[in-house]
Image (cartoon, helix red, strand yellow):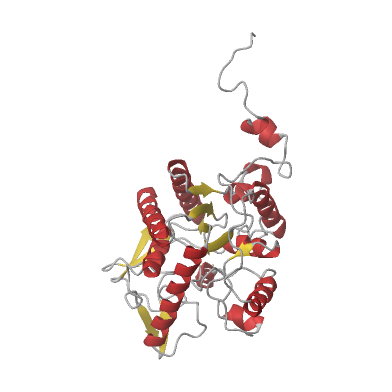
Amino acid sequence: MPQKTNPYSDLPQEAFWRSGVAEAGVFGLAGLWRSRWSLPQDARFSTYGSCFAQHISRALVERGLNWLNAEPAPRRTPHDLAREYNYGIFSARTGNVYTAAQLRLLLQLASGEVAPDAPEIWEENGRHFDSLRPAIEPGGFDSAREAILSRASMARAVARSVGRADVFVFTLGLTEGWENAETGQPYALCPGTLAGAFDAERHAFRNYGFARVEADMRAALALLRGLNPAIRVLLTVSPVPLTATASGGHVLVATTYSKSVLRAVAGELQAADEGVDYFPSYEIITGAPTRGAFYAPNLRSVEPVGVAQVMGHFFAGLRLDGAKAHEGGAAGPDEAADEAAVEAAMAAEELVCEEMVLEAFNEH
């Protein structure tokens, strides 16, 4: 058969399934990602999203890179106590941000577009819970005012983390969520699970489709750039399946739908916007070459060897080859040392995954 010249003639080996995947094997995969940006050697990263996002922040800390902790625990707070109160998990004390709708509201708070007292505060047995962060304060707050003040502090920290960052890393986790049927306010979790009381007339289930997720993400990008016009956004999709689905279907089908929508939105945003990139943590863990080997026996938790593979590809493709941009960091030496000690200790901890509370309602 005569050789023909066409667009496939000069493609690299990773462009073909046989040479790029089947023959390479899971530990021989190469060229999965290369950052589209040349970043400063001392680039600053802020991280938010689902529980899997915590792996990126921990890996940055472990390698001595600049992960921004804009809302650290009070100085000299013992490590276990700081973790119990959700400090040092994300770049601000937000708790898990599972949906694009949550991210949009979070950034509206950070930008001042939404007032800190606008989202609901839940009262239960004399204690008060932030409907956006129901797990953030063990046992709840003493008063609604205290909860709102804490939320306002968090919003300011989010704004600082965006304003100081070179890269905003967000891990998309879910399409399923719950909203107030009248106001449209999204919740972190279904009311009545971790806190609050469920009301079938007030609380509506949402399974956000492509159009809604894309719209929320585009609005979030605009809000991010309002806080920092130079910010770059790195998106990932969590490979962690849903704990439970309220869609009425099987959880396997619901998980596939959810992750497919999120992956498609991330790809659409990356293709249309030079300021957005996508890192394939989802593909590394769930792709055919792994045969599910990176999951724990529960088929949900990602084993350390899988996390190591993800982080290996991340740092192999990260381009920190630009000139330094942040001489003389913002934190004083004592404060920086305190934060580094807490962050290093947290690097070995289990992930904080609020969605796991849903398993408590599984009676089967």
Q: Is residue 210 left or right of residue 255?
A: left
175, above or below 340, in the image: above
Residue 37, compared with residue 91, is above or below; it is: above
| Image coordinates for residue 14, horizontal then vertical, percent | 65, 34
Viewer-proximal residue among 156 and 322: 322
Q: Could you say which quadrant of the image residue 106 lies in?
A: bottom left
Query: Residue at coordinates 55% horizontally, 56% vertically from top-left?
Result: 238
Q: From the viewer's side, name the closer residue of 66 and 118.
A: 66
As drawn, 194 above or below 168: below
Quadrant of the snapshot with the C terminus: bottom right
Kindly tell me whether residue 243 is visible in this rendering.
Answer: no
* View extreme (top): residue: 2
In this figure, what is the number of numbered marks? 0
Picture coordinates of residue 66, whole percent (x, y): 62, 63
> At 46% from the left edge and 41% from the top edge, which residue is drawn?
271
Q: Position of residue 124 (x, y in %)?
A: 40, 86
Please state the horizontal and vertical placement of residue 192, each as a whole percent of the image.
Answer: 41, 76
- Judged left or right of residue 36, residue 103 is left
Residue at 57% of width from left, 83% of height from top? 74
In this orientation, which residue lies closer to the viewer: 329 or 36? 329
Q: Is residue 333 above or below residue 213?
A: below
Q: Is residue 131 visible?
A: yes
